[in-house]
Image (tube, rainbow, N blue to C red):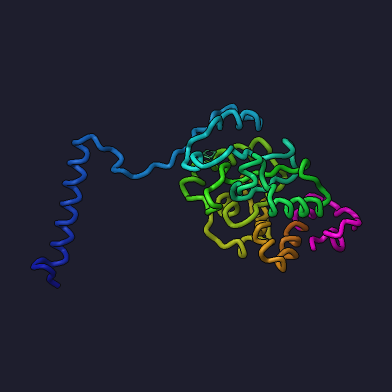
Amino acid sequence: MKKSGKTLQEEYVSIVKAVEEHLRFAHEMGVSDMGVKKVPQPAAPRNLRTLEDIREWMGDCQRCNLHATRTQIVFGTGSPDPGILFVGEGPGEEEDLQGKPFVGRAGQLLTKMIEAMGLTREQVFIANVVKCRPPNNRNPEPEEIAACSPFLTAQIKALNPKVICTLGAFAARTLLKTEEKISKLRGRFHLYEGIKLMPTYHPAYLLRNPSEKKTSWGDLQEIMKELKLEPPPPSADPSRGKEGQLT
Ligand code: SF4
């Protein structure tokens, strides 16, 4: 077939030649990366044993664009020797202001979820995939996740939890390196570097879809079975129903 007097094959050859010529010219001009944005990957020092080591390594991190709009880095809080590590997506407005993860409305629900398991926030560790708030609570960009995830990887190594519970799609997909939907991932254990990982819904999603709370409660009960945790007796707290179930 002819197009502009040339066959498709001739067109293809001339396009390849033009690209080759452009690359050669750029190389001669000293251009090496052709403007392709490189994802900044912090090289992890070898002696990162504690959370303090990791925080020191992060410093006043500016490895991705999120540093420009944050109030402060939200590193994570909780026990340095937790049975469970909860991992969310990133800080929201309240978290950015307070410097602590999950302290807004979704955080209050996460606290109830943890207490329904018979634990306190101080007995678990809570962190996020990205440590700085994405503006207007937008989703983190792939290069921001790539830039920040070495810190989470280092945190997981230092904490060595028995179970990781990811909250929402981003955390599960980042740690499991999959594009699978959260509805397909949740409800069963996966393995992350030899650690059992249970994906469940993000508390913010549960606030918007209260009927799914019982689904997430089922996921948490699987973790409780794994860790041999007994739920606290039903208390006078009206936010808890039978056997600690979230209501
Ligand atoms: S989100 Fe992570 S990589 Fe980006 S600036 Fe904040 S701490 Fe650094």
Viewer-side residue, 60 vs 10: 60
User: Is 193 situated above or below 232?
Assistant: above
Dominant secondary structure, magenta: loop
Looking at the image, which residue is at 77% across and 41% down? 122
Quadrant housing residue 190: bottom right
Q: Is residue 230 magenta?
A: yes
Where residue 160 appears, as percent x and y from the top left, is 68, 39
**Quadrant of the snapshot with the C terminus:** bottom right
The x, y position of residue 196, in whole percent, is 68, 50
Q: Residue at x 73, y 39 (%)?
A: 78
Position of residue 174 measured from the top left corner of the image (x, y, whole percent): 55, 50
Find the magenta span and give its range. Answer: 222-247
Q: Is residue 184 above or below residue 53?
A: below
Q: Residue drawn at (54%, 52%), measured in percent from left and top?
A: 136
Q: Is residue 43 a member of the stretch shown in magenta?
A: no
Above or below residue 151? Residue 111 is below
Is 104 placed above or below 219 here? above
Left or right side of 21 for 97: right
Instruction: Report the residue that reaches farthest toward the bottom.
Output: 1
